[in-house]
Amino acid sequence: MKIRLRVNGKMESVEADPGTVLADILRKLGHVEVKKACGTGACGLCTVLLDGKPVPSCSILAGRADGHEITTIRGIGEEAKELASFLTAEGAEQCGYCSPGLALMVLAMAKELASPTPGEIKHYLAGNLCRCSGYEGQLRAVLKYLEARRG
């Protein structure tokens, strides 16, 4: 089947089997910034925005994304850099493997929740696993980032 996607603002199309997951299609199209890890949608490393909403691309069939807007970490360049500066300042960047998925989740959360509490942040980001940080630095960074966004 032919899959057509707008990825980071650019129309792309590819042939795919109906059972192919979105992560594989994106990587086939050269979007290797989309990480693959658990393959079950449990770790958050493969997160992309589908029409602005965060989804685990390893658990979404590519056909479901046909005709939709996909945003990867490359599609949010300046916002990602700003968030990265907060993560770095709090010592929460560590190896960086989880950072793309985390950044997309934080940016989606910032648009959805006006002023989330630490508990709401933890709940929203619960699907993003990090083996390096211990999460406290990430939480501090996210709180400071959201505060800075609000001005």
Image (cartoon, helix red, strand yellow):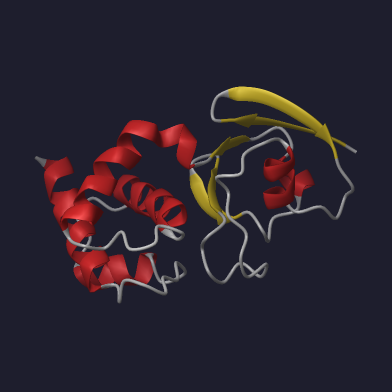
What residue is drawn where x is 44% and y is 67%? 128
On the rendered image, what quadrant is the N terminus found in?
top right
On the rendered image, what quadrant is the C terminus found in?
top left
Q: Position of residue 94 (x, y in %)?
A: 33, 63
Q: Splitting the image into 4 quarters, where does residue 4 fall? A: top right
Count every numbered label the image shows and give the total.
0
Residue most toward the top? 10
Residue situated in front as seen by the camera: 151 or 28: 28
From the viewer's perspective, is 103 left or right of 59? left
From the viewer's perspective, is 58 left or right of 47? right
16 over 46 or under it: above or below = above
Residue situated in front as seen by the camera: 55 or 23: 23
Q: Position of residue 64 (x, y in %)?
A: 74, 47
Residue most toward the front? 95
Residue most toward the left? 151
Q: Splitting the image into 4 quarters, where does residue 138 fall? A: bottom left
Q: Position of residue 70 (x, y in %)?
A: 58, 38
What residue is drawn where x is 57% and y is 72%? 42
Q: Position of residue 10 (x, y in %)?
A: 61, 22
